[in-house]
Every structure is written in structure tokens, then in C-alpha cells.
Image (cartoon, rainbow, N blue to C red):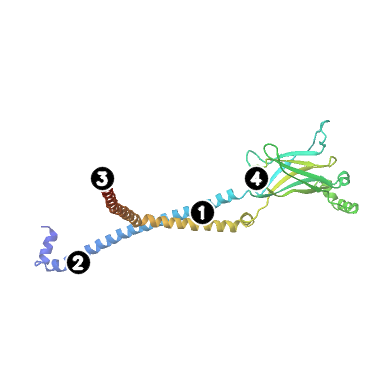
Amino acid sequence: MGLVGLLLMVLDPFRIIRNYVFKPIATLGLAAAEEYQARKAKSVKTTKNVFLKLIIVVLVGFSVVWASIFLYLYFYYSYMPSVLHMKDVHLNIRECKDSAVDCKPYPTANVALTNHQRFLMVGQPYKIILNLEMPESEQNGKIGMFTVCGTLKDYQQEEITSSCRMSMLHYKSDLLKTILTVVFAPLLVFGYREEKQMVTVELFSQFLDDSSQPATNIDITIQCRDIQLYSAELHVIANFTGLRYLMFNWPVLSAIIGITTNLFFILIVCLLSWYHWDDTEWITDIRDRYQQIVQGVSKVGAIEQPLEQYKTDKKTDAISKDWIVDEE
């Protein structure tokens, strides 16, 4: 017995204080401590579960949003063709042989519309424009009207369609030319401005490419030998209509609507998948239903088999009776 035991024996010889004071306090304190520890462990476990669920929700939401954006971008780049294709046109004087009757020495050029892949989308109307950079020279002024022809061809150099348009320089009187020269003289002297015009010739307004006979190149012919040109450029412009028109002219609104729609359907699929995987009663119901159908079919087969046997026996008895009658 130690010093503590001796003191307790001296102070509390009949164990009244120890049994009715210290022991209840100690029991209550231990119970409170155990309850606090259990609550703390439960709280930690609940916090972990909430944290894990929050992480899962954030990851799923992030994946769903990016999946919606990716689907819209894939649809946009696969559905929307390029708006503008520009090709340089290098014109040369056609060489004609002496035996050629229909050949005329006009400026011509062959422009390829493909570069190992088609850039004209099937079913999409295109506008084909030829831009001519022409100097405001006396010779071009004397030419007046001139004709520009374009012929679309396929891989076999067979003609698909052709078109001819007439054009000319914009008319300017001598007085207007003098005034413009005086006003823009400093710019003309230092080379910031030139006496030239950009003449636009629209060869095709609504060209539709055919998948069975795609256009691969175009022949450009200017039916005027004495025309003067700085450069020529071919523009193939997509003429959007319907959904493509909306997506091209209002890209932000179209992106918001498209991404929101994808997000809505993806969330529905995720919720249905979560419901089916979380609740497996539907699998049990399907299995029970299948067993009921199989048992029903087997019962019907078991009922039909005696009936068929009875019919067969009845036919056999009738045949035997007929045979007995014939014998008699």
C-alpha cells in the first residue's frame, strides 16, 4: 500500500467518499470522454466522406463541362467550312499553233482548287469572285468593256460548268482625274497611293460542288489581249444559310446555346447512369421477369405436349377402326 492508499484509509476509512463521490465522477468523466472521442471519430469520418463527395462532384462537373465544350467544338469544325479561300491567279498569254482554228491568244490561267484534299464542302453554295488590280492607264480606258470567263473542271479535266461576265474600269472624267491628282499628289509622289482600281468580277453566285464530280481546278480567261493588269486573285467565298449563317454571324450566342444543350443531355445521361448503378433493383426485376417468362413458356409447353399426344392417339385409334371395318 502506498502513500496515496494510506491517505485514503485515513481520510475515508468507510469508503463513503470513494464509492459515492469519486467513483460516480470518474465514471461520468470516462463516459463523457468516450462519447467525445466517438463523436470526434464520427465527425472526422463524416468530414472525409463530405470532402470525398465534394471532390467527386467537382471532377465530374469539370469533366462534363469540358466534354460539352469539346463536343461543340468538334461539331463546329466538322460542320462549318472555311469562309474564304484565296488563290493567286498567274495569267499568261495563250500560245496558239498555226493549225488551231478556235485558239485565240488571250490571257489565261489554270487555278487548282485542291491541295491533296477538297476544301469545297458538298451541299454548301459558294460564290467565286475574280479580283483584278488594273492601272488607270489610257490603254485600259480605251478597252472599255471586256469579258472574263471561268470554267470549272474535275480530275479528268472534264468541264463541269462555265460562266462569262463582262466588266470595265469605273469611269472618271478628265476633270475628276485632275482634281484627284492634285489632291493626292503628295501621296502619289511618295508612293503611298497609286492610280489603280480593283475590278471585281463575280463568276459564280451559287456554285454547289458535287461529290460524284468534284471541282478540282478552274480555267480563267480574259477575252482581251491588250488589257493591262497588276495582279489577279481568285476568292471562293462560302455563302452561308440556315444554321451555318447563325453560327457564323453570332458565334458567341451559338456557342452558349450549343454548350448548354450538350451539358443538359450529358447531365441527364449521368443522372440516369448514376440512378441505375446506385439502385440495382431493376436488374433483379428483369431477372425475375425473365424467369417468369421462361417458366410460363415451359408450363405452356407441358400443357400442349399432352394435348398433342392425345390428338395423335385419337388419330391412331380412328385409323385402326377404319382398317378393321375394311377387313370385315
Q: CA distance from mark 1 to mark 4?
A: 33 Å
Q: Tell me, yes or no, whether the two marked residues, 3 and 4, touch with CB atoms within 8 Å.
A: no
Sequence-wise first label, 2 or 3: 2
Label 4, on which residue? 210
| Residue 25 marker | 2
Sequence-wise first label, 3 or 4: 4
Is 273 in front, or is 292? 292
Q: Amino acid at mark 3?
A: Glu
| Quarter of the image where one finds residue 212 | top right
Q: Amino acid at mark 1?
A: Ser
Image coordinates for residue 281, horizontal then vertical, percent:
34, 57
Q: Amino acid at mark 4?
A: Asp
| Residue 327 marker | 3
Image coordinates for residue 232, horizontal then vertical, percent:
76, 43
| Residue 98 marker | none
SS for dot 2? helix
| Residue 68 marker | 1
